[in-house]
Image (cartoon, grey):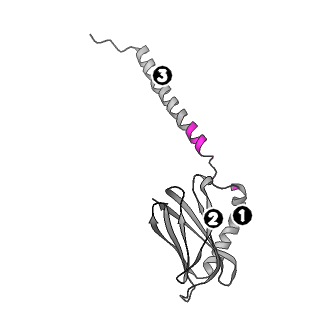
Amino acid sequence: MIKKLEGKHVLFILFGFFGYMLLANGVFLYVALDSFSGLSINDPYGKGIHYNTQIEEFEAQKARGWQVQLLDTLTGEKKAQLVLDAKDNAGKTILFDEVVVKVRRPTLSDLDFETKMVPMAGQMGVDVEFPVPGNWDVEIYASGGGYGKPYRLEKRLWVK
């Protein structure tokens, strides 16, 4: 014998459905807020105010005419070799005084670290061991080459 669907049954079904959805969303909201603050930099307001300055610095860097790229080669599990290939507008290799590598995890700042590149076969390079696999943001600050401001380069890496 099949029971007839009445209004109270539909009401209980609706309350059950929306109650379950609210509970699931509440769990997701709690986990999201507990695991990530929403800030990827320490001073987003200050960075926003100086945005035009950053654009000007980028344009001045671009005016140098350099061809600079970061070559990354995975050398093992959670290991990579980073090599900075830099040539001036005449195609001549640029020798830097110092190259600082800042490595950041996009979601967790606890694992961030910094290292320096050393001369490697006419270029600057460094072997890096990452604490955990996944996405990493690499920022290069290369000082020298005849300029007072360091050359800045960013790249996102996927490490296995």
- Of residues 90 and 19, the one drawn nearer to the viewer in this rendering: 90
Position in image of residue 12 (x %, y %): 45, 18
Residue on which disc 1 sits: 50
**Quadrant position of residue 53:** bottom right
Q: Magenta stretch: residue 84 in it?
A: no
Task: Determine contact: label 3, label 2, CB under 8 Å.
Answer: no
Q: Quadrant of the N terminus?
A: top left
**Nearer the camera: disc 3 or disc 2:** 2
- The front one of 73 and 146 is 73
Which residue range is magenta in the image?
30-43
Q: Residue at x 62, y 61 (%)?
A: 113
Residue kind at label 2, given as amino acid type: Glu
Mark nearer the N terminus (1 vs 2): 1
The amino acid on which the numbered mark 1 sits, given as a three-letter code, is His
How many other residues sit within 10 Å of disc 1, few (<14), some (14-19) or many (≥20)?
few
Mark 3, residue position: 15
- The CA distance from mark 1 to mark 2 is 24 Å
Which labelled disc corresponds to residue 114?
A: 2
At 61% from the left edge and 84% from the top edge, which residue is drawn? 95
